[in-house]
Image (tube, helix red, strand yellow):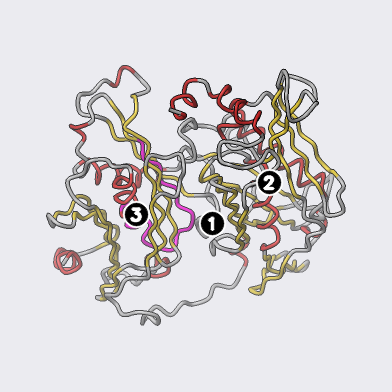
């Protein structure tokens, strides 16, 4: 039988989220009620939250909660991956209760994609040439998705790597912006991120990984239909 | 000096501590670590709780879904507990499918929920034969410093206490399910508490005349070198509902 999970307790087949039976409410996204368009949400950041990890960080931005643990530099498990430069491995996982609909226990394509994006960010930030023949493992767990998850994960990973005393070129922060009908909303909440407008208007989200002092963008991830002029404005 | 001793001979290091009546972190043999529990933290989950016991941190989230009840038990809902040991909680935990420890802990959680009778499964079935709640209870371990059983049970019970479910009605004529916006708490019949001990077999013990020495609320290092482990799940009136013992020698 495909999809039978032998390792975990399973529920009945064909269980559905109860939200599909509720009446949908129209969320008014014309105007932000709690902050201005360019303002960020309140942020809480703490390092050293995992006792056994080399470095760790916990970030809370609005409702989004992400925890990152860094282990390394440690021995490469497979001898065949010998490398003079050092290997970075980045795994991201949403907790099953993190999103509005329940997530499966296995990593799906979205989590793998976000893990790869995070790894790309770090390839140019971490000085891997200083750690030959070792690997640095970064594990990201998203406890709640309230919008701007990748940006929060990038910031937390930068902090966790600093907490682990791993050499980097610069401070890494993540930031995201949502473009909706000509409005540029910095640090969108979940409703703003997923809101759809009619075709013809531009709408999309852009997340960047940014090096602070050297003013360089190490990662750019955008979703949606955006013209190049709005991309420019958003990045600035 | 003591750190090297701990790294080279962990069992000797611990036994030397036990013989004086205290443990490496300063606790007495029967002292437990301070516990803090906070409920209702995750808005995307229908019920949640986070428990911190010393360094051990677990977070429990409950997601509720609807399904058709089975024909054998048409008036009962489903409870699906699982524990997830993330690779970031301890360096020895690898990425991949759940290890034997994780599978065993998940089964333990399921046993405790059913044996303690903390929830009435018929409460989870608003419309018999048609609609039943499925509670997916996921305990995510963020930091593993020993004694996951106690922390996981505490988080599970705290999350069940914070769980809020909407009302479900079924229209027989239209064969349609409708779910209300307002939510209400579930009736929890009892709150089981788990107490775990690590058991050490000492040849000659000066403090106790018995062969076995019990350490309450063990840390990861103590669990690693212990001979066996025993846990009791106790209800409010002092009744023991589940006992669990692992190890090589009888107690």
**Chain bearing mark 3:** A
**Residue behind mark 1:** A101
Q: Which mark is residue A150?
A: 3
Measure the alpha-carbon separation of dots 2 and 1: 16 Å
Picture coordinates of residue B16, whole percent (x, y): 60, 26
Residue indicated by mark 2: B80
2 vs 1, front mark: 2
Quick one: label 1, few (<14), some, or many (20+) residues within 10 Å? some
* Residue A215 higher or lower than A72, as above or below: below
> Which range of residues does the magenta coloring cover?
A137-154
Numbered disc 2: secondary structure = strand
Viewer-proximal residue among A221 and A120: A120
Foreground: A232 or A48? A48
- Which chain letter matches label 1? A
At label 3, counting other C-alpha atoms closer than 10 Å, the crowd grade (few under 14, some 14-19, many 20 or more) is many
| Residue occupying image coordinates x 45% and y 65% | A63
Q: Which SS class for mark 3?
A: helix
């Amino acid at each position: 039988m495909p999809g039978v999970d032998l390792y975990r307790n399973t529920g009945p087949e064909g269980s559905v989220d109860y939200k599909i039976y509720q009446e949908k409410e129209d969320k008014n996204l014309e105007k932000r009620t709690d902050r201005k368009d360019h303002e960020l949400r309140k942020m809480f950041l703490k390092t050293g939250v995992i006792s056994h990890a080399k470095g760790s960080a916990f970030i809370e931005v609005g409702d989004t909660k992400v925890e990152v643990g860094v282990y390394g530099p440690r021995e490469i498990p497979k001898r065949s991956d010998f490398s003079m430069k050092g290997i970075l491995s980045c795994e991201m996982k949403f907790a099953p209760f993190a999103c509005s609909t329940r997530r499966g226990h296995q990593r799906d394509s979205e989590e793998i994609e976000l893990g790869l994006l995070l790894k790309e960010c770090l390839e140019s930030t971490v000085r891997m040439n200083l750690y030959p023949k070792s690997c640095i493992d970064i594990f990201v767990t998203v406890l709640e998705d309230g919008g701007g998850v990748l940006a929060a994960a990038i910031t937390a990973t930068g902090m966790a790597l600093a907490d682990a005393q791993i050499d980097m070129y610069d401070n890494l922060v993540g930031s995201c912006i949502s473009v909706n009908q000509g409005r540029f909303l910095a640090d969108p909440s979940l409703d703003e991120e997923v809101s759809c407008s009619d075709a013809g208007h531009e709408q999309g989200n852009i997340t960047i990984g940014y090096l602070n002092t050297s003013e360089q963008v190490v990662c750019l991830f955008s979703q949606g239909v955006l013209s190049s002029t709005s991309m420019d404005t958003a990045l600035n | 000096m003591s750190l090297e001793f701990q790294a080279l001979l962990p069992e000797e290091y611990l036994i030397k501590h036990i013989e004086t009546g205290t443990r490496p972190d300063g606790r007495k043999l029967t002292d437990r670590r301070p516990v803090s529990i906070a409920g209702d933290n995750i808005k995307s989950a229908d019920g949640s709780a986070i428990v911190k016991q010393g360094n051990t941190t677990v977070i429990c989230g409950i997601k509720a879904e609807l399904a058709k009840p089975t024909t054998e038990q048409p008036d009962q809902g489903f409870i699906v507990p699982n524990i997830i040991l993330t690779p970031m909680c301890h360096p020895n935990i690898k990425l991949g499918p759940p290890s034997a420890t994780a599978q065993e802990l998940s089964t333990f959680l399921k046993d405790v929920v059913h044996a303690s009778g903390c929830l009435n499964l018929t409460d989870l079935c608003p419309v018999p034969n048609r609609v039943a709640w499925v509670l997916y209870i996921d305990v995510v371990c963020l930091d593993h410093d020993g004694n996951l059983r106690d922390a996981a049970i505490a988080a599970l019970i705290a999350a069940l206490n914070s769980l809020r479910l909407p009302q479900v009605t079924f229209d027989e004529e239209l064969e349609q399910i409708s779910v209300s916006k307002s939510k209400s708490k579930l009736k929890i019949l009892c709150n089981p508490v788990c107490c775990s001990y690590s058991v050490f077999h000492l040849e000659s013990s000066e403090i106790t005349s018995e062969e076995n020495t019990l350490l309450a609320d063990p840390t990861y290092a103590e669990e690693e070198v212990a001979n066996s482990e025993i846990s009791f799940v106790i209800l409010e009136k002092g009744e023991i509902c589940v006992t669990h013992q692992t190890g090589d020698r009888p107690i």
